[in-house]
Every structure is written in structure tokens, then in C-alpha cells.
């Protein structure tokens, strides 16, 4: 082993240690924030599922990517964003736990830091992450301008919001940094951020059209996660409701994106995204079709039969009997929409089985078997042994 190889090995181990230490720091801050929130911070501070999702998802997945693929900037970007968000999260909840009187006497910069750390993560999620995914670099050097516009726009927006807020909503205290004149810079920062978002989405489209093989599968994971997260979180945000269910939906929707990024970057043989989406949609529909009516009918039967266990047991058996046929029918319909390859393969195999009942010529059966195997499974080599 040469000295250069040895130094690279030591440097690699140091990088891995740094990545895991930062990730553990962010997750520890998040855990401490939940502790302070349960001890009394909930009386002052309102937390949202998307903020928790960015903090936990970015810290965990960012540390994993940075440790496994240290040359990919995506991991370090997510890790830095997650740690900053976690630090602001625990500071915000800790100030709320300490109480109103202590918050009034807290340094101005500390309260501002706690209130503003949600912005870098939210903007990064829509600008730099799509731009750099999955290689850690923009599609070409000319796209690097978006990195600068996103960074500058984020910094300007933070200054604008920090100086344009008269009172902090969580603590009901006057913002000592309030300065209406300085806050006007927000009208410069917002167009930069908006342009970065549009440009980053365009970069994903360009990269997808130019990609093939594993890179296309990686982008497919990212796009599916982004679409599903948007579909799930939009109704929640539009409703304005804030309870345990909306927090859970926001958290799962936001965590889906870093989870998809981690799977796409770290898996050489990617899972079939169409199959994952198909199964997820199927089980969600089956649950809605069987569990909800089961709960309603169980409650009704219990009241009508005055708590009879026989009625409840009968409904349970009926639900279990319907589970398999309902799942099969729903899976077929969903595959038809979301997993067309599997649906077409199943139809090809069924057609072959029908022809096999009437065919008696071995050579014809062998040729048909090879053709069906190629269409259904797409192997690189097909061989048939006849004994």
C-alpha cells in the first residue's frame, strides 16, 4: 500500500466519522426538541410536520449519503441543512419551554435564529436538491448560475423576513431587528428564489431527457417522491388545519423525498419504482375499502346486538374472506395505471397458458415459451433444455 493510498484511506475514515457525527448531532437536537416540547414548549411553540420532516430526513439521509458517497455534494448539502434546521428547532422549543419571561430577555440574534432556520431547508428542498440530484453536480457548467441565485436569494429572503416581522408569532414578543426599510430587500430575494425553483425543475427535465439506464431510474424515484409528496401535502396546507393527523401527513410527505434520494443514490440495482408505487396505492385503497366499512359496521352491529361477540366475529370473518379477492382486483386495476409492464406481462402469461392447453407440438410450445419469457421477464439470455 502506497503512502497516497494510506492517506486516502485515513481521509475517507475521517470523512465518514465527520458525516456520522454531524448526523447524530442533528438527530440528537431533534430528540431534545421533542423532549422540551413535551415538557411545556407546546404551550408556546407550534411545530409543523414539514419542518420535522426536513430536520429528521435531511440529517439521517444526508449523513448516510455523505458517509457512503463523500464526493457527492447532495449528502453534505442535506446534512448541513438538516443540522442547521435541527439547531434552530431545539432552540425554538427550548425558548418556549423556558417561558415567556426568559424569552423576552433572550438575545435578539438567538430568537431570530430560532425563528428563521426553517427557510434554508425549505428553499434548498425546492432549488439546490433538484438541481444537483443525483450526481451532486448541475447538468452542465452553465447551470451553476442557479446555485448562486438560490444561495443569494435565500440569504436576501432571510434578511427580509427577519427585519420585516414586527412580532414573533410563537413568543408574542417584539422583534428587536424589525426595520421596514431593510425589509424591502425581500422584493429582490423572492424573484431570485422563484427563478431558481423554475430553473431547478427545468434542470430535472433536461437531465431526464438526456439520461438512460440507472440514471433514469434514479430520476424516476425522485420525480415519483416529489409528485406523491405534493399530492399528499397540498390539501393539508390548503385546509389550514393543525392537529396530529396533519402533522403526520406533512412529516411523511416531506420525509418521502430524502428517503427516495437516499435509495436512488445508494442502490446500484434500484428497486422498481412502479412496483413500489403500485403496491402502496393498492394497500391504501384496500384499507379504505375494507377497514373503514368494517369499523363502521362493527360499531353498528355492537350497538344493535348489544355488544354481542358473535356479530363482531362474523364481520371479522367476512372482512378476511373479502381481503384476498378485493386485493387481487384492486392490484390489477392499479397495475393497469401505475405498473403497466407488470400488467402486460401478466396478460402475456395468461394468454400463453390458454394456448398451452390446445397446443401439442413440442417445437411450437418451446418457441412460444421463449417468446413469452423474453416479453415478460426481459432476460439477457434464454436457454431451453428438453429431456
Image (spheres, rainbow, N blue to C red):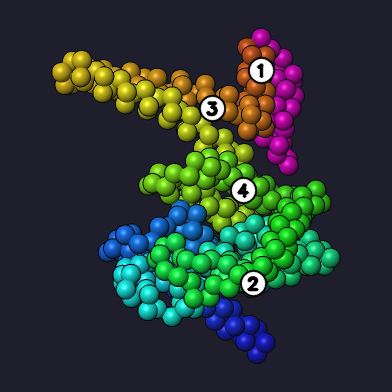
Q: Residues within 10 Å of mark 1 (few under 14, many from 20)?
A: few
Q: Say which residue appears at 72% left-offset and 49% top-offset.
A: 216
Q: Secondary structure at mark 2?
A: helix
* Residue behind mark 4: 226
Reading the chain from its start, which is encountered first: label 1 or label 3? 3
| Magenta span contains residue 375 | yes
**What's the CA distance linking mark 1 and mark 2?**
73 Å
Label for residue 351?
1
- Which residue is tagged 2? 181
- Place of residue 169 in the rendered image (x, y in percent of width and height, measured from the top left): 44, 61
Mark 3 or 4, nearer chain start = 4
Residue 113 at x, y percent in the picture: 50, 73
Quarter of the N terminus within the rendering: bottom right
Relative to the observer, which residue lies in front, 15 or 5?
15
- Residue mark closest to the camera, 4 vs 2: 2
CB-based contact (under 8 Å), mark 2 and mark 3: no
Q: Classify residue 79 by image quadrant.
A: bottom right
Within the magenta stretch, is there residue 282?
A: no
User: Which residue position holds label 3?
Assistant: 331
Q: CA distance from mark 2 to mark 3?
A: 59 Å
Mark toward the start of the polypeptide (4 vs 1) = 4
Amino acid at each position: 500500500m502506497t503512502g497516497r493510498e494510506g492517506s486516502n484511506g485515513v481521509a475517507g475514515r475521517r470523512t465518514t466519522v465527520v458525516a456520522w457525527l454531524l448526523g447524530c448531532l442533528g438527530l440528537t437536537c431533534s430528540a431534545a426538541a421533542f423532549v422540551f416540547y413535551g415538557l411545556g414548549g407546546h404551550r408556546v411553540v407550534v411545530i409543523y410536520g414539514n419542518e420535522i420532516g426536513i430536520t429528521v430526513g435531511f440529517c439521517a439521509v444526508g449523513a448516510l449519503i455523505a458517509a457512503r458517497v463523500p464526493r457527492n455534494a447532495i449528502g453534505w448539502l442535506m446534512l448541513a441543512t438538516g443540522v442547521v434546521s435541527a439547531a434552530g428547532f431545539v432552540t425554538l422549543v427550548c425558548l418556549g419551554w423556558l417561558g415567556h419571561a426568559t424569552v423576552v430577555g433572550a438575545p435578539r440574534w438567538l430568537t431570530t435564529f430560532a425563528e428563521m432556520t426553517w427557510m434554508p431547508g425549505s428553499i434548498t428542498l425546492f432549488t439546490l436538491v433538484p438541481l444537483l440530484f443525483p450526481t451532486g453536480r448541475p447538468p452542465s457548467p452553465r447551470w451553476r448560475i442557479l446555485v448562486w441565485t438560490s444561495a443569494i436569494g435565500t440569504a436576501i429572503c432571510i434578511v427580509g423576513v427577519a427585519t420585516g416581522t414586527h412580532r414573533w408569532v410563537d413568543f408574542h414578543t417584539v422583534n428587536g431587528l424589525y426595520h421596514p426599510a431593510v425589509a424591502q430587500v425581500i422584493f429582490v430575494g423572492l424573484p431570485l428564489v422563484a427563478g431558481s425553483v423554475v430553473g431547478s425543475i427545468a434542470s430535472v427535465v433536461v437531465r431526464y431527457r438526456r439520461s438512460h439506464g440507472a440514471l433514469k431510474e434514479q430520476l424516476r424515484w425522485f420525480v415519483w417522491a416529489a409528485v406523491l409528496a405534493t399530492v399528499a401535502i397540498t390539501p393539508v396546507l390548503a385546509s389550514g388545519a393543525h392537529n396530529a393527523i396533519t402533522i403526520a401527513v406533512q412529516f411523511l410527505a416531506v420525509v418521502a423525498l430524502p428517503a427516495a434520494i437516499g435509495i436512488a443514490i445508494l442502490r446500484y440495482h434500484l428497486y422498481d419504482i412502479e412496483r413500489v408505487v403500485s403496491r402502496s396505492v393498492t394497500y391504501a385503497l384496500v384499507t379504505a375499502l375494507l377497514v373503514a366499512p368494517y369499523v363502521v359496521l362493527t360499531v353498528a352491529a355492537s350497538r344493535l346486538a348489544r355488544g354481542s361477540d358473535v356479530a363482531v366475529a362474523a364481520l371479522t370473518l367476512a372482512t378476511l374472506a373479502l381481503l384476498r379477492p378485493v386485493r387481487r382486483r384492486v392490484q390489477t386495476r392499479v397495475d393497469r395505471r401505475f405498473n403497466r409492464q407488470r400488467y402486460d406481462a401478466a396478460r402475456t402469461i395468461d394468454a400463453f397458458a390458454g394456448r398451452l392447453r390446445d397446443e401439442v407440438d413440442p417445437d411450437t410450445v418451446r418457441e412460444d415459451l421463449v417468446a413469452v419469457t423474453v416479453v415478460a421477464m426481459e432476460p439477457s439470455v434464454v436457454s431451453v433444455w428438453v429431456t
